[in-house]
């Protein structure tokens, strides 16, 4: 028996007893989600005093020579094969030669180790491949990224038995099997616990012999690669009513591999997600029997499916959609900057108008921020971390900010981006945005429940230990652990209160920061706000307890602050890793100004809505004594940043790297040529302006320019006309392709006949 301790037995014991009573019960899915993955820089941010030297010392993500060769070779070849217009509007699929190419070059096996016949690439290489292909075709990018993200391959690598890996991974690597993963069902979207898909433990015949297995029944939808998959990873609830396994009847969510050729599997029908034609569709299983050996991880993993999924998602969610989103931001920065430079109204490039400069700057700043965050996250993944909270931040904010900048790009392009056709290089991306917002955890759910809800427990230095102690079945052992964690938590809170008080009353003037030249002041501001965030989070948890989980708007605001702290850390890390390029400073400064303003506004909203008004007033005196004072990016900064993507420069190339360029006389290729010609003619155009002559032909007649200069201006004029031109079609080209679309009969009957 432990000796008497005044602190533990007199002070901590009643707190422990009270906390055990009021702590809300945690569902099994919530507990397993919390246990999935790990923490990384997010844990530093929760301390209230992040170690900037540690951040800057992390090695940046880099490619091996082999990975670079793959990008320069097969990836470029693939991009050259892709015709996004025909894929989406004529073929409704990738052409057969592209399917053959991606299988032959093992695009589906990027994450599969070489010992199983895969490429064995790093997370960063996976990200770079998805990023580049995304700039050519969203359908192709999704096709390539899904087998390397959440699915049979990732799950087998993490949880599969040696026999399962030997059997399935080589087939996945070389494309003999095309994988998909079935999770979402009509009854269960975000709420996986509502899943009704079932697997009953029973005996059955398989390949001519009686074995113990599962009789599966399911209905899944929204399954990417589902219509063409040969190997389905399936999530279901397992039951053992006859206790054949000797344990409980309700075994929990379980994952299994189901070859789609088995009797009872219904697969092949397609969805059309926002007119994106990557293979996606529903599937069903009716009394499909598989041996227990087909459970991923074998019999020992029955019931562990949700934890397995969340662990796999902790990595995959930080790569695939953030890579596509970062690519989209860079793509629209390059294309919209070029278009705003060559497109003139009132004899002035539209990019010179302040009303256009503001969204141009937002596009450029977002492109810088998203790729910075993508690289930092990949650096963590390359080191073997699986940061669950950070991956949620990345998926949420990358796709949300993609939506903003794509909308900006559409606004600037106007009719050019609205009229569809082979010359429209923006429309397909615009239509794809809602897909990214919705999949791998809907953004509304992620923002309101996941980022802070999960982060406050996982990344906090003491909270998870306290919760574990409170849930301990042995009260004595739980009290011992709680006593240690609780008082460490108290010390942590007081330390952050003093930090926040000093840093906020001095405007962060003396907050910790590395020597980073012009950027030093930004580190100080992040140190200041990290302390304020940590303190406010602790006080919200203390005053609301488990009720904070139901105060979703408060949770979302805390999540926004945590997200901004991470994203801005990534921007500073990028600035450091790229050698503090002076020409890029406008992009960094825009990111910091926008992010710091968001942090201060969210803090103000939290303090205005915290139910305990005494605590709210006290916190306001500590963390915002003068109210939110951060300014938005200045007009001067917006102008400088917009100019960065309006003219050719090394800074523009750093902001928009690795975009697929194919010389095919389509929209993007035309735009690049016109941009090069127009910007190369700037000195000649200045002569015309000085002479107050708008038409180069009149300038030639008046001797203002020579023949060679006139030829250059004429070539640029024709190139610009080719970009500005939009597609049109003969009426018969847009006519329905089959008679059934003219049918005005019963809609249900029409659907049935269309399916046939």
Image (cartoon, rainbow, N blue to C red):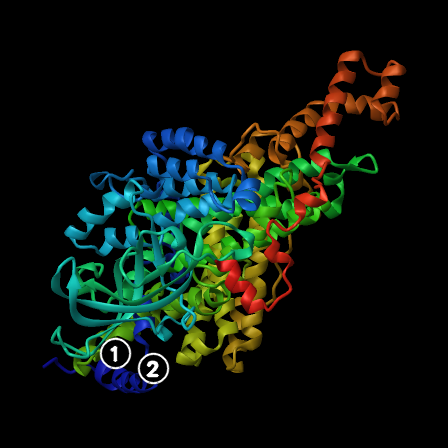
Q: Which quadrant, please, contains the N terminus?
A: bottom left
Near mark 2 (Cα within 10 A), the count class, few <14, some 14-19 or many ≥20, is: some
CA distance separating discs 2 and 1: 9 Å
In the image, which disc is placed on residue 471? 1
Q: Residue at x 64, y 30 (%)?
A: 670
Q: Residue at x 32, y 76 (%)?
A: 27
Q: Which x, y percent locates residue 400?
A: 54, 56
Q: Residue at x 37, y 42 (%)?
A: 126
Q: Looking at the image, which is closer to me, 176 or 32? A: 176
User: How many numbered discs?
Assistant: 2
Q: Looking at the image, which is closer to me, 500 or 534? A: 534
Farthest left residue?
A: 1
Q: Looking at the image, which is closer to me, 579 or 471? A: 471
Q: Which x, y percent locates residue 321?
A: 45, 51
Residue highlighted by disc 2: 23
- Whether pointer 2 and pointer 1 mark residues with C-beta atoms closer than 8 Å, the reply is yes
As helix, strand or loop, the secondary structure at mark 1 comes to loop
Q: Is residue 569 above or below residue 265?
A: above
| Residue 483 visible in the picture | no
Left or right, residue 681 beside residue 259: right
């Amino acid at each position: 028996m432990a000796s008497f301790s005044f602190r533990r037995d007199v002070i901590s014991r009643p707190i422990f007893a009270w906390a055990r009573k009021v702590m809300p019960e945690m569902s099994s899915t919530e507990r397993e989600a919390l246990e999935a993955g790990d923490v990384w820089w997010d844990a530093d941010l929760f301390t209230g005093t992040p170690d900037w030297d540690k951040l800057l010392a992390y090695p940046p993500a880099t490619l091996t020579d082999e990975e670079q060769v793959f990008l320069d070779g097969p990836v470029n070849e693939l991009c050259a094969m892709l015709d996004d217009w025909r894929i989406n509007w004529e073929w409704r699929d990738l052409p057969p030669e592209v399917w053959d190419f991606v299988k032959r070059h093992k695009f589906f096996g990027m994450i599969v180790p070489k010992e199983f016949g895969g490429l064995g690439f790093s997370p960063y290489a996976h990200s770079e491949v998805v990023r580049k292909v995304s700039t050519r075709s969203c359908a192709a990018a999704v096709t390539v990224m899904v087998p390397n993200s959440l699915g049979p391959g990732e799950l087998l690598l993490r949880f599969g038995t040696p026999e399962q890996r030997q059997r399935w991974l080589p087939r996945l690597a070389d494309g003999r099997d095309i994988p998909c993963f079935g999770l979402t069902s009509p009854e269960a979207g975000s709420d996986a616990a509502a899943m009704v898909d079932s697997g009953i433990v029973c005996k059955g015949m398989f390949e001519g012999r009686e074995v113990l297995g599962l009789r599966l029944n399911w209905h899944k939808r929204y399954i990417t690669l589902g219509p063409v998959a040969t190997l389905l990873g399936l999530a279901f609830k397992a039951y053992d009513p006859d206790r054949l396994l000797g344990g409980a009847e309700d075994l929990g969510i379980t994952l299994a591999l189901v070859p789609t050729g088995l009797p009872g599997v219904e697969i092949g029908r397609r969805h059309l997600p926002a007119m994106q034609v990557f293979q996606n569709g529903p599937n069903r299983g009716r009394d499909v029997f598989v041996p227990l050996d087909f459970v991923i991880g074998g019999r020992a993993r029955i019931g562990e499916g949700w934890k397995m999924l969340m662990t796999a998602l902790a990595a995959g969610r930080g790569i695939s959609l953030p890579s596509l989103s970062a690519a989209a931001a860079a793509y629209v920065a390059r294309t919209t900057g070029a278009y705003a430079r060559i497109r003139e109204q009132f004899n002035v490039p539209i990019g010179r108008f302040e009303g256009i400069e503001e969204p141009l700057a937002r596009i450029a700043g977002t492109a810088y921020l998203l790729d910075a965050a993508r690289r930092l996250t990949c650096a963590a993944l390359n080191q073997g971390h699986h940061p669950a909270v950070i991956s949620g931040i990345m998926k949420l904010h990358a796709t949300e900010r993609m939506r903003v900048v794509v909308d900006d790009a559409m606004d600037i392009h106007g009719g050019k981006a609205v009229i569809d056709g082979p010359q429209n290089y923006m429309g397909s991306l615009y239509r794809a945005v809602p897909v990214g917002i919705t999949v791998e955890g809907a953004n509304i759910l992620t923002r309101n429940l996941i980022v802070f809800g999960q982060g406050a427990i996982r990344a906090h230095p003491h909270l998870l230990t306290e919760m574990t102690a409170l849930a301990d079945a042995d009260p004595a052992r739980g009290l011992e652990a709680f006593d240690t964690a609780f008082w460490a938590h108290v010390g942590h809170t007081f330390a952050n209160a003093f930090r926040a008080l000093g840093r906020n009353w001095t405007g962060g003037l003396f907050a910790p920061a590395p020597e980073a030249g012009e950027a030093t002041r930004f580190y100080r501001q992040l140190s200041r706000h990290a302390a304020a965030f940590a303190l406010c989070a602790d006080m919200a948890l203390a005053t609301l307890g488990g009720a904070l989980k139901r105060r979703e708007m408060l949770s979302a605001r805390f999540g926004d602050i945590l997200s901004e702290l991470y994203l801005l850390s990534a921007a500073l890390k990028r600035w450091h890793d790229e050698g503090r390029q002076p020409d890029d400073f406008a992009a960094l400064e825009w990111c910091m100004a926008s992010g710091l303003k968001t942090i201060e506004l969210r803090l103000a909203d939290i303090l205005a809505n915290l139910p305990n008004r005494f605590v709210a007033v006290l916190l306001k005196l500590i963390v915002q004594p003068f109210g939110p004072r951060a300014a938005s990016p200045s007009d001067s900064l917006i102008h400088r940043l917009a100019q960065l993507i309006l003219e050719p420069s090394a800074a523009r190339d750093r902001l928009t790297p690795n975009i697929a360029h194919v010389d095919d006389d389509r929209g993007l290729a035309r735009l690049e040529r016109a941009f090069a010609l127009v910007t190369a003619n700037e000195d000649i155009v200045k002569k015309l302006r000085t002479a107050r002559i708008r038409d180069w032909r009149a300038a030639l007649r008046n001797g203002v320019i020579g023949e060679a200069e006139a030829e250059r201006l004429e070539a640029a004029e024709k190139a610009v006309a080719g970009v500005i031109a939009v597609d049109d079609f003969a009426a018969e080209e847009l006519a329905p392709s089959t008679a059934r679309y003219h049918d005005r009969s019963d809609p249900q009957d029409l659907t049935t006949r269309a399916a046939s």
